[in-house]
Image (tube, grey):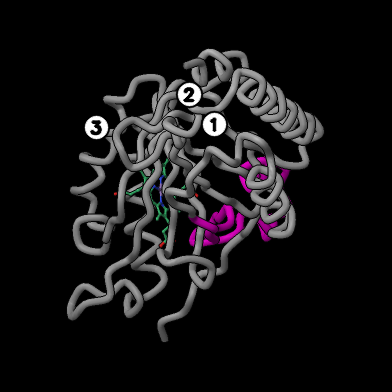
């Protein structure tokens, strides 16, 4: 019988993409802009404090291309906190100049395809907990896209036996491991939460590595036969200390 794999689920995740209303921003007074920047820096400091306490994590990148200007990724233990963050940003002064571009709700996910070693539930291991509640890397570049597993005719992921799926994913992980140190990936699951089944968030020091890993994985059976992909977003890191300069007009 075909069965689901058990998943280990960690922090909830919100990818929040915004476009800046530059026209309105330029029309605002200096005082208003300064108030907006100071308020936003306060929010960043608040989120940093949450991260320092390991109660969540976040990153902020500038999107390249016209799909948005900013991408935030927030991780929190509860959906309520994600909602609170979103609302606080919307109510902030800077929020008056942010136009929603896209959002994606999911939860950090690892799966239990591999049999438990020595009967130890992997979910109890500290290294698993660290991966389920990760402090997001602040590497130079981000790449985010959602994906599905195909469900068509002979190419139906959901009619494959679990051990077959596990083997295909093991092959996939061998490709992934070649990029150790170059690409860091966070897989979030969104079945029942958002329009796609998984979100892939990649971090790299060198943007070409996104193209290389995604291209190489296209030839792994799990992607070539069973992968369907959504829209891609790519961006450059925006550290707190550069926010004011980025917003200067
Ligand atoms: O548990 C693990 O993380 C190790 C094995 C592993 C699994 C189970 C793994 C390793 N992945 C797993 C699951 Mn992955 N991954 C992607 C993409 O564009 C594409 O073709 C695919 C997008 C990338 C780039 C990537 C990278 N992976 C998954 C799943 C869940 C599927 C399911 O349950 O059906 C998806 C959707 C997915 C997609 N993967 C790795 C990587 C990398 C770099 C690794 C090696 C990580 C490491 O060992 O450090």
Spatial CA distance of label 2 from label 1 is 6 Å
Q: Quadrant of the N terminus?
A: bottom left
Residue 162: quarter of image: bottom left
Q: Residue beneath label 1, please?
A: 60
Instruction: Please name the residue shown 68% across and 39% down the image.
Output: 92
Q: Is residue 154 magenta?
A: no
Viewer can see residue 129: no
Instruction: Please name the residue shown 57% across and 51% down the image.
Output: 14
Q: x, y (%) of residue 123?
A: 68, 55
Marks 3 & 2, CB-CB < 8 Å contact: no
Spatial CA distance of label 1 from label 3 is 23 Å
Q: Residue beneath label 2, please?
A: 237
Observer-nearest residue: 3 or 31? Answer: 31
Stretch in magenta: 104-133
Instruction: Please name the residue shown 51% across and 15% down the image.
Output: 248
Q: Residue furthest right?
A: 53
Q: Is residue 113 magenta?
A: yes
Q: Residue beneath label 3, please?
A: 212
Please tell me whether mark 1 sits on a helix, a strand or a loop: strand
Observer-nearest residue: 78 or 36? Answer: 36
């Amino acid at each position: 019988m075909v069965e689901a794999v058990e998943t280990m689920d960690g922090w909830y995740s919100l990818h929040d993409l915004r476009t800046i209303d530059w026209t309105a921003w330029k029309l605002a007074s200096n005082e208003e802009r300064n108030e907006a920047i100071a308020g936003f820096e306060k929010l960043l400091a608040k989120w940093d404090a949450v991260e320092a306490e390991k109660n969540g994590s976040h990153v902020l990148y500038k999107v390249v291309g016209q799909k948005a200007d900013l991408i935030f990724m927030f991780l929190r233990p509860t959906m309520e906190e994600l909602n609170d963050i979103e609302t606080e940003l919307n109510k902030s002064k800077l929020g008056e100049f942010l136009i929603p571009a896209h959002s994606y709700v999911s939860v950090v996910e690892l799966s239990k395809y591999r049999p438990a070693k020595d009967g130890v539930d992997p979910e109890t291991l500290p290294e698993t907990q660290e991966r389920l509640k990760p402090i997001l890397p602040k590497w130079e570049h981000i790449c985010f896209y959602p994906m599905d597993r195909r469900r068509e005719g002979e190419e139906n992921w959901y009619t494959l036996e679990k051990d077959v799926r596990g083997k295909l994913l093991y092959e996939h992980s061998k490709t992934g491991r070649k990029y150790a140190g170059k690409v860091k990936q966070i897989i979030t699951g969104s079945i029942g939460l958002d329009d796609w089944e998984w979100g892939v968030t990649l971090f790299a020091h060198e943007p070409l590595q996104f193209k290389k890993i995604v291209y190489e994985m296209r030839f792994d059976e799990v992607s070539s036969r069973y992968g369907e992909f959504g829209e891609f977003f790519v961006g450059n890191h925006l550290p707190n200390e550069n926010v004011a300069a980025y917003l200067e007009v």
